[in-house]
Amino acid sequence: MDYYDYDHLIDYVSCAQKKSKSDTLVMMCRGNSPSTCEIEDILTDQGVVCGDYLPLRVPCSGRIPTDFIFKVLNSGVSSIISIQCEDAFCRMKEGTKINTRRFQLSKNVLSQLGFDENALKVVKYSRKAVYDTTKCVGCDKCVFICPYEAIEAEPFATPHIVLDDCVGCGACQLVCPHEAIEVKGFEFQNVLKRYGDILPQLKAKSKDPAILMFVCQWSEFSALDTPDAATKGKNALTLEVPCFKSLDPVHVVNALKCGFDGVMGVVCSSEDCKLEEGRDTAERNLSVLKDVLKKMNLLDRFELYELSPRCEGEFNQKLDAFCARIAGLPRREVIMVEAK
């Protein structure tokens, strides 16, 4: 893809170096790094302390050109940390395996050239569901919804999560009635707070429609990695979700009730979905959501689009069209309504 080729990656790092004095580059696969970037937590859990760093979030670290690594280390960056998905959870074909081999070969070459042995470091990490058993009532809904059979029912106890099988898709979070099981970085209350806090600011700074976008992290890359550029000139907030099946329809309803003028969803096509039963679950949720919005006379303020990273620029076209449509509707007032 043009915006992840060698030249664009080098330009990104060069610009990041001008804004920060850090000499550590952290490369992250989008499948294991929340958009809220709790990267420090991930590295700390793995026993890695790097302080300030230059973040580089890419679809798959296995696709990073080897030339890029050498160029970066020769441009003022002293160390590169690559946060890769665990082998079994890579969303791209052999992405982690490819990068592991490339890094090992690169380390051998760098060692011969006199670079520090820690110039390149690999951290294996895959996002998992976080389970608070004190909130669990044992309804076992998560057991039945998990498409990976990563949650097992227990006869006289709360369900057991098989972490080795969990991919952090968020399906369990959607059906849990007590927020006992959630995906780090995409917790219900966290998402609620993020769009709830920004809404008054959007309304105050512009008369343009306040737009909230929920975007599957696999349906659009450039807009999620550079959200400020994607929404430039728009009165909009972009929130990423690991898979559209994990998006709670309550957020769409609540956002509109709070005062957002429109809510836009962006999802992968069935062929591009990276997670099992992702679109099947999403379609069922969408049907229920549209029925609720219709009864509330809010259906004209919501739209769902299918996009692919292969179609560069299509996201902006859809956003422009949606904003133009919402601009023709009456402006909604800010009403702080908390989801229940």
Image: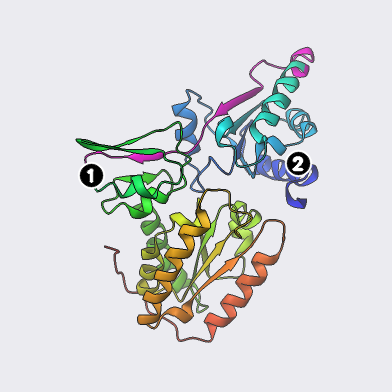
Q: Is residue 168 left or right of residue 69?
A: left
Q: Is residue 163 left or right of residue 309?
A: left
In the displayed structure, 316 sits above or below 224; it is below
In the displayed structure, 271 sits above or below 30; it is below
Residue found at x 50% / y 77%: 209
Q: Is 120 covered by the magenta stretch? A: yes
Q: Is residue 162 left or right of residue 227?
A: left
Q: Is residue 239 visible?
A: no
Relative depth, front residue between 6 and 165: 165
Q: For mark 2, give the secondary structure.
A: helix
Q: Start and end of the magenta stretch?
A: 109-136
Find residue 283 and report its horizontal and vertical position in percent: 48, 64
The figure's colour scheme reads rainbow
Find residue 113 and report its horizontal and vertical position in percent: 79, 15
In the displayed structure, 78 sits above or below 149; it is above
Q: Residues within 10 Å of mark 2 (few under 14, many from 20)?
A: some
Q: Name the kind of residue labelled 1 in the image.
A: Gly
Please give the residue where the numbered disc 2 appears in the rendered image. Answer: 10
Find residue 13 and report its horizontal and vertical position in percent: 70, 41
Q: Which mark is residue 138?
A: 1
Q: For mark 1, give the secondary structure.
A: loop
Q: Which mark is residue 257?
A: none
Residue found at x 42% / y 33%: 163
Relative depth, front residue between 332 and 132: 132
Badge 1 vs badge 2, beta-carbon distance below 8 Å: no
Q: CA distance from mark 1 to mark 2?
A: 50 Å
